[in-house]
């Protein structure tokens, strides 16, 4: 790559925006040319506008960058990484798509649109084939792709090889989700210290639907939803990063924990993902220790991009129980959209 | 009651033992006449032997009490509250039963014995009718009753009215359990700060079996296990006290969340439990707020004896989902055995 | 007391307001006749307006009470407990004082006024003698009293007997403050989980000044500041309730840790405080264990009103080091103003 | 360096031992040839013997290494990194020194010996000149160097430029120390969740003495203790890694916060430390934000080797107050001894 591809981060001062800035630092393919935020930050540098909350220092190049309004005018980027909240993403992301950019979004606003892919390159890279139809339908030069809800991410990746080899009929999911999933200031400490909150608004609905789209098949211009059903119960727990989910699965074909472990371990990155800088290698790690994965110890596997599985065992009611861990602000948010962008470059949707 | 009934606390210096001492302070029916501990503590007063970890001061009467070896000789008590670990309970509890005492035990050692009841007076007080057979079988003057595993407690109480009115076929359980459930020193802080551990040895097996016994029917000298099945996934979370469990239930009879809530709210203490000092009134509280119950806010309902339920809603796969909270070291341990002892007094098994 | 004294809680829906409501439940002398909040809550009941965050249920009498605007018109109360933020307290509290009420305030707005006492009845009950001058100066029928900043509370109480017997010249203070001190939502969980924040805006200035006023002597219409100096460093720590402070003290008169302990233990409630329902008895407890007091274990001593001291030892640079713990939202906020009100009743300033 | 220097890690399975293994992975100068542990682990591989608790996976080369008894026989290493507890270090470290190895120890056992340096290469690299005398005194082929107590580390580094430029007379220190400082299992979660423990046995004595030795001058065969005095109060807080200390300093020469900040920022690694792989560059970072440093956000600066300072301001009683943060298991333990070993190589004490 002779020169780097110019990119912009939308809503760069929030917690997911900061992760984009962190992960884009010294990225081999991309160069950040603009950072945007809400009107309050107008006229400030990124350092002035941003209450940086990550444990690596703010990159030097970002410090003095002016924070721009979140509008495409004057922004010479080919990719827009969107950390916008769903409410404003609805109107703003199309403006960037219309202006010719590939919008790689963490927002939920367009995930349910039939012509917008929810990408997890490790398992459904071929969903990029919705993009031409999306452009045509909407008359955009650019387009929108999304990453899924952070709590759907790890479980959906882990379900891919299981679905492929054994078929999946029903999945019970209980999540234990980190506080960083709620952004900043997000969860009040008075609500979560020495406590658990068994509720996150709208989250269960996303977990019950998004995996079916992501694991669905491209049929013409649309995705045929995968034919299994999910029941989700979500909980917020006092953990900084890393969403853990407990799964019970009913499968089409009877199998054993060993065969499931073998399928998970044998799963390879698809051809389309080979060589993406952010792609975890292998995509799924299965741990043998009976008490793993654990958020604090395992979330940073593969620089936060690996899906970690453990406790694969027989379910006395259905077939298989297991536990899946995924880093919610890396694999489940900014890192996910970053890998999506890499896929778009490799497949020529961004040139 | 003219004079109080003399009781002893076995293994009184550990965390459950301390709860017994705390809850027995100024109890209207019982008076502690002896405290025991392992050999290490021999010759010490309770204050010297005990690293008191509760947030109310050690009762004055307990401070200067000598710590005795855990052997019945010379202990003039009618009830022995046992906070022994399962391993030593196996041998020691029968010695106290043989010596004529009613052993009210928190240990798992005898829970699977067909002639030993696992009591939750709110829902299965009639299981005391196993006691005569137990005495006869074993040739003891006294007998053993147990309280269930702390994570089974709340869910089993909440299942009673649901089983009675709608029938229960299958239950998926995911627990979020407090650190105090592991005793002291128990869970290392390095294992649980900013973390979740998706494993507790032996716990899932207990949750999958104990509720079936507790909700079973007395048939002659035994309990016929209730005819439903449980699948459990357990997690340790950084919460001091209060076990939260997420349930998905398949019922015999189709129903609605409103009817389930009504059944839970209508549930009354059985006749046999009326007037027990530790019995929560009502036994089950259903909260309306979408994000409750929460351990820190709700565990002390009814002085830690109430079972709190929330988020009763339709399960897209089975019938009903809900969340149950119970204080693990009060209702789920010492408080449970204390109420068991009260039941034994009321029903004349202890005179 | 034939009938109870009618009181109002200002800003009753916030975290300190909730504590007032909790502590006033079944108070032997006071009856809540009105609850106020900001305009957003107008027209709602207290239950509708309030996100109740305490671990005892909202009192039944409060649930259906209408939330009124924070204005004295139509409020038939003799005492106004103020949980207002300092900014609005500045203007609103005088309105209630002008309307004839005794304002017992938790806000900092008037603490530096020479004619407004910062009361800690255990140690400076006689500061109520500023009240007549305050009324005269300001032409109010009522008046304002305040409780101190929560982090000044415990240390100032503990300094009283030391100052009286040994004289105090200099005090170094480092605080470890609970999250509840910042109200709700207050401290973001992302800021404090697995973390410490060595800064709380404006707090060090309060700790360096307020104790000198509280330990000062009434001279005519004013307080002569006590003649010692304080240096403070504050920290926020992941603790729900209970502020711990580490003190190093230079004294006028050389002494030993034992003499200091003796002075602290001998300290008695002054005559004026005898019989106040909220007065802790004794006011100060000194613990012998080398690792106490600790927030979780000791904050609820005396229903949260006791000042707990420990680790009294020689300071190799000055004279004495020690650790003091005080419950920040009970003794250090709502409970403090409640005891102030009780003192005003006993001394006839409220009739 | 043609080939790497062979090293052994003593007590490699504990928490500091694991840090040594982690930090030695792919070290440019050193190669681990042996790992030792207590007798319990004999005959096991490192993977079998070790409950790995770090958030990067165990290095592959370490997994299958046999765990040896902690005895020099048969160990062909030039450097022994010691993570032994002080009690066993007393006897075992001399055996390795006698066998010709340079022992780089984290233990306290030899820190008070006049001929054993407590090294912080950034500030007292010249203390290596004690080594020849130590060898001669004790008749060893090898020798012992130590790193200081983890809570002394950051503050002593930060004091160096202040002492040099302004002189230091007295220092008040209050620490907020992470749980990892107590090893594993170390602090029970029941002791620290929602809590603070104002006591760590023996720690205050170390903080009051070690900095004086480390900042002292080599005079002949000994160190002349620096001529200032320290008073310490220590606290354990619920933070995983990173010790924060609050300092109040009395200086010889009056100065301003700005001058102190300038001195800290201007401080350079001494000549002897240039080029050491683990040396942080710069050694000290001063943050401008009023609420920094914070453990979670700043402990990993310079891969955990940087000393971070903030809140430099006027002390109303003495001269200057400030806050210092240092990673306790990296800079304050394993990373410290690793840098000590690098210094020994550079200066020819290890060849």
Image (cartoon, coloured by chain):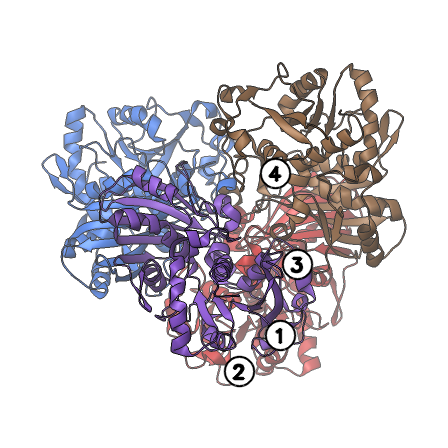
Chain colours: A purple, B blue, C red, D brown
Labels 4 and 3 positioned on one and the same chain? no
Front-most of residues B67 and C184: C184
Please name the residue that numbered disc 1 is placed on: A68
Give me the C-alpha separation between circle 1 and circle 3.
Answer: 18 Å
Give me the C-alpha separation between circle 2 and circle 3.
Answer: 54 Å
Please name the residue that numbered disc 3 is placed on: A59
Residue drawn at x 33%, y 21% as measured from the top left? B73
Q: Is residue A139 above or below residue A181?
A: below
What subunit carries mark 4? Answer: D
Relative horizontal placement of residue C138, taking residue D179 as reference (left or right):
right
Labels 2 and 1 positioned on one and the same chain? no
Q: Are discs 1 and 4 less than 8 Å apart at CB?
A: no
Residue depth check, mark 4 versus mark 2: number of the one nearer the observer: 4
Give me the C-alpha separation between circle 4 and circle 2.
Answer: 55 Å
Numbered label attached to residue D181: 4
Q: Secondary structure at mark 1?
A: strand
What subunit carries mark 2? Answer: C
Of the numbered discs 1 and 3, the one sitting upstream in the chain is 3
């Amino acid at each position: 790559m002779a020169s780097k591809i110019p990119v912009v981060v939308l809503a760069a001062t929030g917690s997911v925006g900061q992760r984009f800035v962190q992960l884009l630092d010294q990225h081999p393919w991309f160069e950040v040319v603009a950072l945007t935020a809400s009107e309050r930050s107008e006229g400030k540098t990124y350092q002035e506008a941003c209450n940086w909350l990550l444990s690596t220092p703010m990159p030097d190049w970002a410090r003095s960058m002016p924070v721009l309004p979140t509008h495409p005018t004057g922004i010479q980027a080919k990719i827009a990484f969107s950390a916008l909240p769903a409410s404003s993403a609805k109107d703003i992301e199309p403006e960037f798509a219309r202006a010719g950019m590939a919008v790689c979004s963490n927002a939920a606003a367009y995930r349910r649109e039939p012509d917008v892919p929810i990408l997890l390159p490790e398992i459904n890279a071929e969903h990029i084939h919705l993009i031409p139809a999306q452009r045509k339908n909407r008359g955009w030069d650019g387009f929108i792709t999304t990453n899924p809800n952070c709590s759907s991410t790890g479980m959906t990746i882990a379900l891919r090889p299981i679905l492929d080899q054994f078929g999946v009929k029903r999945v019970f999911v209980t999540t234990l989700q980190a506080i960083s999933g709620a952004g900043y200031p997000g969860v009040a400490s008075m609500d979560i210290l020495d406590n658990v909150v068994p509720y996150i608004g709208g989250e269960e609905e996303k977990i019950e639907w998004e995996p079916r789209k992501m694991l669905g098949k491209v049929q013409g211009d649309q995705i045929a939803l995968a034919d299994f059903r999910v029941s989700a119960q979500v909980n917020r727990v006092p953990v900084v990063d890393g969403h853990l989910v407990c799964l019970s699965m009913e499968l089409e074909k009877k199998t054993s924990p060993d065969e499931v472990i073998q399928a998970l371990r044998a799963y390879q990155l698809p051809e389309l993902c080979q060589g993406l800088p952010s792609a975890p290698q292998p995509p799924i790690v299965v741990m043998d220790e009976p008490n793993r994965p654990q958020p604090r110890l395992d979330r940073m596997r593969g620089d936060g991009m690996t899906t970690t599985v453990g406790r694969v065992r027989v379910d006395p009611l259905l077939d298989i129980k297991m536990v899946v861990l995924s880093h919610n602000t890396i694999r489940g948010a900014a890192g996910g959209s970053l890998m999506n962008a890499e896929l778009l470059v490799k497949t020529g949707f961004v040139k």
